[in-house]
Amino acid sequence: MERFFAAVVQMTSGPRRDENLARAAGHVRDAAARGARLVVLPEVFAWRGAREEEASLAETIPGPSTDAMATVARETGAWVVAGSILERAAGDGLSFNTSCVLSPDGRIAARYRKLHLFDVDLPGRVSVRESDTRAPGDDVVVVPTDLGTLGLSICYDLRFPELYRRLVRAGAELLALPSAFTFATGAAHWETLCRARAIENQCWLLAANQTGTSPHGFADYGHSLIVDPWGTVVGCAGDGEGVVLAEIDRAYQARVRRELPCLEHARLR
């Protein structure tokens, strides 16, 4: 499909999975009613609570969250990137931070486990050690759709450009980025990094972020974005929950890649 609408959903997720899933489904329905064929939810959209509770509340996939998103995908006929879900890992008490893509018929079309874990201490602002409770994934994941080939990433992955170049080498035209970027790092780098990943890979980038105050006590940045292959921000949220739509024009992307063929000129692989 040459032209279609896509949406990013901005949420403030908390420790009540049922409430989060109901709100997420409502946002997907809203986006689809406004014409979106692809909807991206934020990182940990389904459950976000105390780190010490993650192992006991992690899900299997398929499980409650993918089942709920499969239902809304079937209802709306949209592709749904189910942000990320804490997926139970075998044996060590850790969880994967996993993004799933639901097809319009409700099938799990792809599963991506976050590669890069956010272990950061910014004194007086935020301290996070994801590796205490989460395990990293191993695979770079793209999924062909009737809207174009979708490359998957999550939040902190944004700081690792080599991942996105591998996604593009595997055929990605659209880049999904479910996130929970903190205010401290988001205010400094969020838009710059999103635009850079779109520009250098000549891709549409759909970045869905958490907003408000997290259950961990620090502020999330919001400002979910849709960026075109030239690096122009064509859709941007503010600070509250909501949905942002933009039209995706694949012919425009093809023209950008044709007129500035930097992907063909790359000598380092």
Image: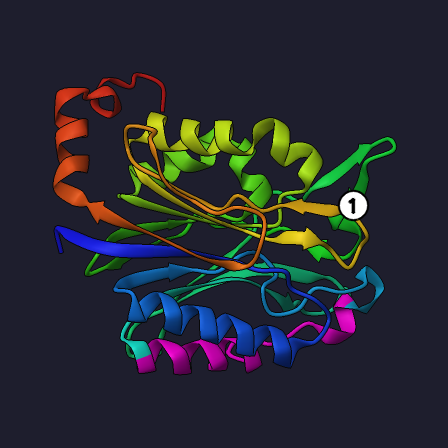
**Residue shown at the point (78%, 44%) measured from the top left:** 128
**Residue shown at the point (58%, 54%) measured from the top left:** 240
Measuring from the top left, give residue 124's x and y in whole percent. 87, 33
Q: Which residues are magenta?
A: 54-75
Measuring from the top left, give residue 258's x and y in whole percent. 12, 26
**Residue 69 on the magenta segment:** yes
Measuring from the top left, give residue 203's x and y in whole percent. 30, 37
Reply above or below: 160 against 21.
above
Reply above or below: 63 against 228.
below
- What secondary structure is marked by label 1? strand
The residue indicated by pointer 1 is: 129
**Residue shown at the point (73%, 74%) measured from the top left:** 57
Residue 259 shows up from this direction:
yes
Q: Identify the amino acid type marked 1.
A: Arg
Main SS of residues in magenta: helix
Residue 200 placement, left or right of 49: left
Reply above or below: 73 against 247.
below
Image quarter where the N terminus lies is bottom left
Query: Foreground: 40 or 96?
Result: 40
Residue 53 placement, left or right of 153: right
